[in-house]
Image (spheres, rainbow, N blue to C red):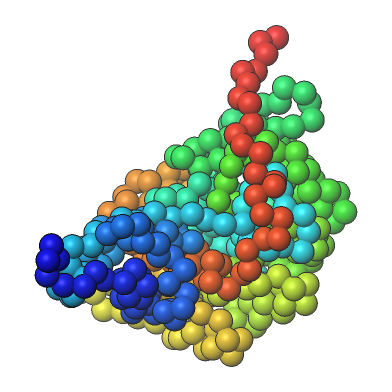
């Protein structure tokens, strides 16, 4: 006999790995089994969400489990492939998923959340763009530190998005003075927003994060009804007033059949830098209570912290300036939760990859 024991059945190994992944991510084994494929004595795990910073820990965890089991001798490698989520309208060319970051009121840190979410998804291995849909108060150019840059065009019909820190971006703030956009009526603002989305030559993106204007008015309804949003994230703070407005945002998306992935609670608490004491100055657990009321996950709870505020105005996001900061870890955890929630709850697009045309041809501006 050349072999001392029976060969392990492939489905047994996949089942074993799937169970370990299900435990790690708190999902059903039937879900995680779809991420696994066995080739000879090698298990290939392909995540449908962005989690690249966790790969070393996951690989060590799975490989150790295999080595300590009857399946020793099998190896494992990790990969991730982000699919396009189903939308109510035909998708935008080259954009797999459009995620709106919204709030019922201003001043809750929505734009800061949008920028840091985009940067965190990028660090988790996704290709990411950001669209500043806040026509009346664009913040993205300030936060990316490129307020003086302008999109280039070769045909006077389509724009090349600007690039910063690995992200691509477009905003009304790059095109017109802030005081001009501030006096536009709703239909004009809505038309400008549609042009920003459809006339930008987006490269192939896993996620286009949209920084929405606060409220539930014309521009928000235009986004929800005329743009192929894959899903939305609602940002709030813990106090009752913000929560009451956040409910309106959730209700708006529910009414137009846009999935809400969950809530992000900003200013959850203030933590003393000297002693570490937490002070819940804007109330406690308001975001968690609202999430439970609507059957949604709380995707992240971020503290009131001067570091977040400082980086928001310097033109270099926190995750770029201080990627090892504990708050950067919190934003990456939030980004993984957003990506995973989308992959697990939004069906894969019926359009498949037909709208993914490949990278647009780059061009250099013509010197006058």
109 and 351: which one is in front?
A: 351
* Quarter occupied by residue 235: bottom right
Residue 186 seen in the figure: yes
Horizontal relation, residue 266 to residue 234: left or right: left
Horizontal relation, residue 124 to residue 261: left or right: left
Whether 210 is drawn above or below 347: the answer is: above
Q: Residue at x 63, y 77 (%)?
A: 246
Q: Residue at x 66, y 54 (%)?
A: 352
Whether 167 is drawn above or below 185: the answer is: above
Percent position of residue 96, x then y: 62, 52
Q: Residue at x 72, y 77 (%)?
A: 254
353 and 311: which one is in front?
A: 353
Q: Quadrant of the C terminus?
A: top right
Percent position of residue 354, x then y: 69, 47
Percent position of residue 322, x then y: 31, 50
Q: Quadrant of the N terminus?
A: bottom left
Whether 214 is drawn above or below 210: the answer is: below
Residue 312 seen in the figure: no
Q: Residue at x 71, y 60 (%)?
A: 350
Total of numbered circles in the picture? Answer: 0
Looking at the image, which residue sits at the far top? Answer: 368
Percent position of residue 301, x then y: 43, 73
Whether 54 is drawn above or below 341: the answer is: above
80 and 17: which one is in front?
A: 17
């Amino acid at each position: 006999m050349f072999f001392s024991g029976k060969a392990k059945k492939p489905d047994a190994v996949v089942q074993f790995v799937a169970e370990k992944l299900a435990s790690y991510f708190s999902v059903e084994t039937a879900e995680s089994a779809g991420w696994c494929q066995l080739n000879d004595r090698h298990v290939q795990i392909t995540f449908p969400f962005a989690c690249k910073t966790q790969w070393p820990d996951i690989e060590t965890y799975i490989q150790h489990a295999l080595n300590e089991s009857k399946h020793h001798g099998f190896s494992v490698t990790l990969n991730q492939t982000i699919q396009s989520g189903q939308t109510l309208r035909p998708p935008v060319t080259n954009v797999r998923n459009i995620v709106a970051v919204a709030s019922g009121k201003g001043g809750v840190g929505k734009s800061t959340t949008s920028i840091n979410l985009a940067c965190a998804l990028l660090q988790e291995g996704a290709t990411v763009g950001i669209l500043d849909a806040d026509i009346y108060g664009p913040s993205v150019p300030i936060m990316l530190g490129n307020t003086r840059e302008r999109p280039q065009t070769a045909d006077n019909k389509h724009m090349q998005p600007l690039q910063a820190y690995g992200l691509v971006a477009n905003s009304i703030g790059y095109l017109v003075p802030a005081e001009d956009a501030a006096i536009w009526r709703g239909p004009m603002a809505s038309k400008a927003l549609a042009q920003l989305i459809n006339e930008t030559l987006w490269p192939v993106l896993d996620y286009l994060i949209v920084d929405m204007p606060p409220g539930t008015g014309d521009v928000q309804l235009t986004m929800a009804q005329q743009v192929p949003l894959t899903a939305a994230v609602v940002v709030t703070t813990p106090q009752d007033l913000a929560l009451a407005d956040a409910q309106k945002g959730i209700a708006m998306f529910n009414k137009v059949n846009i999935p809400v992935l969950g809530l992000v609670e900003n200013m959850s608490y203030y933590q003393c830098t000297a002693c570490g004491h937490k002070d819940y100055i804007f109330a406690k657990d308001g975001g968690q209570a609202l999430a439970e009321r609507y059957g949604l996950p709380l995707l992240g709870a971020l503290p009131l912290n001067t570091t977040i505020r400082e980086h928001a105005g310097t033109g270099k996001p926190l995750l770029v300036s201080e990627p090892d900061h504990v708050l950067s870890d919190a934003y990456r955890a939030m980004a993984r939760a957003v990506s995973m929630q989308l992959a697990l709850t939004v069906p894969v697009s019926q359009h498949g990859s037909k709208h993914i045309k490949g990278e647009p041809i780059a061009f250099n501006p013509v010197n006058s």
